[in-house]
Every structure is written in structure tokens, then in C-alpha cells.
Image (cartoon, coloured by chain):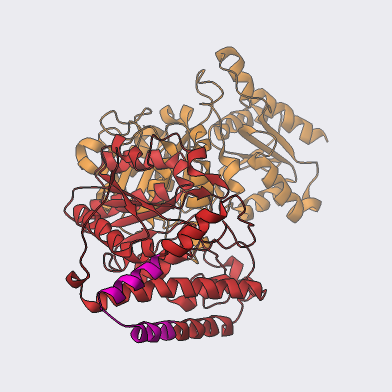
Amino acid sequence: MAEIYKKEIQLKDYPKDVLLNFYRTMVKIRKFDENLIRLMQEGKVSGFYHSGIGSEGLSAGSIRENLRDEDYIYYNHRGCNQKIAKGVPLSKIYGDFLGTTEGTTKGLGAGIVHSADPARGVMGQAGTIGSQLGIGIGTAYASKFKGTDQVTVIYFGDGAASREMLHGSLNWAGLYNLPVIYICENNEYAISCHVSETHAVREHIADWAYGYGIPNCVVDGNDVLLMHEATKEAVERAKRGEGPTFIEAQTFRHRGHFEGDPYDYVDGELLKDWKENKDPIRNFVSRLLLDKVTDEQELKTIDQEVEQEILEAIKKAESAPQPEPGRIYEGLFA
Amino acid sequence: MRTINMRTALLEALNEEMERDETTLIFGEDVGKFGGINKVTQGLYEKYGNRVFDTPIAEPTIIAAAVGMAITGNARPIPELQFGDFAGIAFDEIFNKMGKWRFMHGGQMEMPITLRLPVGIAGGAGPEHSQSPQALFMHGPGLHIAIPSTPYDAKGLLKTAIRDNNAVLFFEHKILYDMKGEVPEEEYLIPLGKADIKREGSDVTIIATALQVHTALEAAEDLVADGVEVEVVDPRTLAPLDMETILSSVRKTGRVLIVHEESKTGGSGAEITAQIQEEALFDLAAPIRRIGSPDVPIAQNIYLEQFYRPSKEQIIQAVNDLMEY
């Protein structure tokens, strides 16, 4: 059965700039999200959006100091978090939502899914949820075949974990000893269904990995440093040729499945507890201040810098033109 | 010129391309030591080692992995599904991922996959192992569809498919594996999207694919006695579809019969018919006729099975009807 990942972490073991980078990445993710919701409310962005507010620590921790541009990720349905942590320019992500030529798809438009930035290892995502579980093992297979030390990280939610593809994927990963890391962002709800209503697994989703001989653990996904350490061990294992790792990261979403979801299927007191006591950014700030790594003024400066960066990115994305109608005929074939 | 069967021609194509490009990878169920259930990959595992590997029975994973390999640019996957029918198990991976991943991510990646799919009625394999589902994929953008009828075409098309940076679905009729034909020793390639006129004629155009090309040719020989000259056009690829060659033949003969083993309703003939009438309605001397399989699942019984496959007699009757219209 999956073990709960625990590690004593001292802030003094980390350089200050690394700690502040974790903070900056989390703030960037949250402000990106808040501003995107604003654009939706202003009627500039249409469609569904799956807010990643509340789980910033998971993506910032696993990606920021662990993955290089040449390492691959497949993001999940709250995947702007991961795209931002991997370094995709904000203007390009906003451009995809706004449908302007600044987007990664050069005006084709993309929401959470279909943004891609292969130069930064962001290989895209499927609208049919969980399909990345199969595609990611192909990418990992290609790295092993070519003899590189590139690592593939596949993000997916607890909902996607019920797709049959998880099992085909885990079987290949275990069988072929692939350099792949599964990060299940367990926020407990697949739209309105609680994880306990949709999974026959005994206790944790990570228990499935055990059956395929894949090392696994359950981590507090809201602890950015714990997330960093767990993923770091998995990345090192993959680079040593020791194969896959499965990490189930526990978190909770602060907003509904999509904007407009009344989110009344979640107990109000429970949600309040996650927001007030388990917020990844708030808790990290408390720790930074307690250990006197930084002060409120320095953090405020970072907030302002990020805010400025976001506004400039939106301006850049908004001022780019809509594509010509002929755009739909470009790029189907190589 | 030497004659070899289509199985050998396909194997030669795979072998030559594996030798030419070390990023090529063959995988699927039983394609390794066993050499494939149709023996098309025989000997490749012994020669290329880990570049040919057996996979678990998991079709969606086979195709998804091919997509993931292809988009890295580090591998050129050549997966095999044991039966084309199994495309249904991996439909999302073929239709939405192989076909669309490049486009929907802004054209930033390439998809050099050649997916081999055996199709057709072949001796009591039953309703889930005898189908010809190629027309399903004409409906989905982003996929090339090859369907050869001779060893020569099979080898030249497969080599092109493997070198192409786009996804190609390569349909092989099971009965044709043992059919012989002339294949030169020296290397050649056949482009995708170039139909072949298998027989020239002036009275009726028969557009046929795979095994039905041969049935049409046999019918054409018999029809000579009745003074009817049939032209047999083999599109060779359904996507891209060489409408130029098809229309040129139609304008010459004015009469069209389309023959395929796919179910008649919604088969590739339906699309070809529509395109011909859009472009050449007033060149037609009679309505376009189609012969396909009946629109019912394929029976397992070998006696009944033959009634699903278009016959020479059906073709002769249809040609005579066209001539008398």
C-alpha cells in the first residue's frame, strides 16, 4: 500500500533565491488565474475554464527546480499551473485563451488543453481527459530508445485516473522500465463526484501503481517543498534508469470544476478549512516569515512585479490580431 | 521481372526502411519473435533486436504510445494492429490523437506514424475480425489512408508511408497477402495520392480498391466478349484521393461503377460518388452504381461469408445495367 511521503525540511537547506522562486511561481499561477477569470467576466474569453487556484504548490514544487526545458510534461485539466511553472510565456497562454495570433497555436485558440510549447517540453494535452497517460509513455519510450536522460512527467487528476488508459500506461511503464513520473493531482472531485464514489481502489489512487511494481507515495501537494523533494527523488530515479514513479499529490480546488459551477456539492466548512488553513501560498509565506528568510516588503515587491508581468502579458496577447480565416487550413499536415 | 507475394513485398519494404533509418520502430501484438500473425514482420526481430518489440494486448496504449514517440522527433513508429477491426478499440487514439494532435497544437509537431491494419473477409474470422473500416477515417482530418491491391503498390506505398512525416493508416487485405505480382529488385517509391489505372477501357469506369481490383479485372476480361471495354481505376490511397485521375476516366467513359468490400452505406464509394456528381454530373450517361458489402454484420459461417464480398457476377450485371441505361 502507498506510503505517506514524509521528510523533515529545513528552509536553511535551500538558497534564498530558490525559495523565493517557488513563491514567485505560485503567485504567478494564482494571479494568472485570477486575471483570466476577470477576462471571462468581461466577456473577452469564452468557453470553460478549470481554475487551478488552491493547488499552485503542486505544480511549482514538482516542476520549478526539477525539470529542464528538455524534460517533457503533459499537463492536466487544471494545467495552466503546470504550463506556467514550466516557463511557457504568459502572453502565449493568454493568447490561446483570447484566440489571438500571440497564442502558442498562432490564433487557432486553445483553452486549458491544446497549448503546446515543444521547445520547453510542453507537449500538449487532450480534450478526452486522461489520454495523456498513453501518449506520455510513448514520449518516455522515445527518450529511453534514443538513450537520453530526458524525463517525462504526466499530470492527471483523480477523475482521469478512472480512465482505462491509466492501466495500459502503468503496465507499459513498469514493463519497459520507462523514465516517466505520474503525478496524480487528487483534488478529491471529478466535476461533482467524490473520489470515493468513482474508485474501487482500496485506499489511495497510488495503490494501483504498487500492483505494477512502480514505486509510489502519497504527498501533501499543498506543501511546495515536500512536493519538490518527492518529485526530485523520482526525477533522479528516472535519470538513473530505474524507471517510473507514481506520486499522488493531495490538494483541493478552491473554485468549482468550471467557472459558473455552483460548487454546492462540497461542504462549506470543509472548503473553508482548505482555503484558510491549507492554502499553499499562505502557508509557505508564514514559513518564510517565521524563519526570517524574507520580509513582507520583499514579498510585496514580488507580488507587484508579477502583477506587472501579468498585465503586460495580457496587453501583448490582447493587442495581437485575430487570425485570418485561412488559419483553419494551416498546419494539418507536415 | 521476379514475382513475389504481397506479404514478401511488405516485409521487404519494412526491412529496407528499418535498415535505412535507425529511428524506425516496429511494435504490436506478436510482431516480434512470432513474426506477426500474418507473418509480415518475420525475421525483423532477429535482425533489429529491440527496434521490434511485442506489446501487451492494449490497442489504445499501442497507438497512444506511437503518438507520444512520434511527436518527440526521436522515433518513427510503425505499429501494427492485428486486425483492422481493432481500430475501434483505439478509435480515440487514431481519430483524435494521430489525426489531430499536430493541428490542434498549432502545427508544432510532426506525426510520422505508419499504422498497419489488416482488413477484409478471410475464412470465417467472424464479425469482429473481417471488417473493412477504412471509410471511417476518411471522415477524420489529418490521416492519410493507403489501401494497396498489388505487391508492387504495397511495397512502394509502404516505403513512402514510413518516410512521410504524417500519420498514414495502411490497410492490407488479408487475402492479398498470398497474391503474387511483379516487383522489381531495385528501390522505388509510390507517392500518396496518385491513383493507378489498372486496365484501360472506353465504356465503363470501375473504381475499386484492394481485393476488388482483381475481381473487377476478372469481370473486365469476361466483358470483352460482350464488346464492353472496362477501365479499372485503383485509387491506391483514399486520402489523399486522386480525383483528377478518377474524373478524367469518368469523363472518358461516362459510366461509373464503384466496388469495395466496405459496407455500402457510408463506404468510401459514397464519398467518391458525391465528388464525381459535384464535378462531372453532365458527363455521366447513367447514374453511378455502387457494390459494397450488405449493411449487416459479417457472418462467421464460411458459406455465408462469400455473400458479403462483391462478386465477378455482380460486377458484370452492374456493368451491363449501366450499358443498357
Residue drawn at point x = 20 percent, y = 66 percent: A10
Where is A231 relative to B232, above or below? Answer: below
Give above or below for A207 relative to B276.
above
What main secondary structure does the magenta stretch of the protein show? helix
Residue A119's spot in the image, x, y percent? Answer: 35, 70
Image mark count: 0
Q: Is residue B159 left or right of residue B271?
A: left
Left or right: B325, with A225 as reference point: right
Q: Nearer the viewer, residue B282 or B227?
A: B282
Quadrant that contains the N terminus of chain A? top left
Q: Quadrant of residue A154?
A: bottom left
x 25%, y 78%: residue = A293
Find residue B312 and report its horizontal and vertical position in percent.
63, 25
- Horizontally, residue B270 falls left or right of residue B77, namely right
- Residue B109 appears in the picture as rendered: no
Quarter holding residue A213: top left
Q: Which chain is red?
A: A
Q: Is residue A78 magenta?
A: no
Residue at 34% across, 72% down: A286
Query: Is B134 or B140 nearer to us in this picture?
Result: B140
The residue closer to the viewer here, B123 or B236, is: B123
Tell me the residue at 61%/15% (across/down).
B304
B261 w.r.t. B126: above or below:
below
Query: Hue of chain B?
Result: orange
In the rendered structure, which segment of residues is drawn in magenta?
A: A280-306
Estimate the x, y position of residue A43 in percent, counting from the top left: 67, 74
Q: Could you say where residue A131 lies in the image, as x and y percent from the top left?
A: 46, 48
Q: Quadrant of residue A292?
A: bottom left
A302 falls in the magenta region: yes
B14 vs A162, nearest the viewer: A162
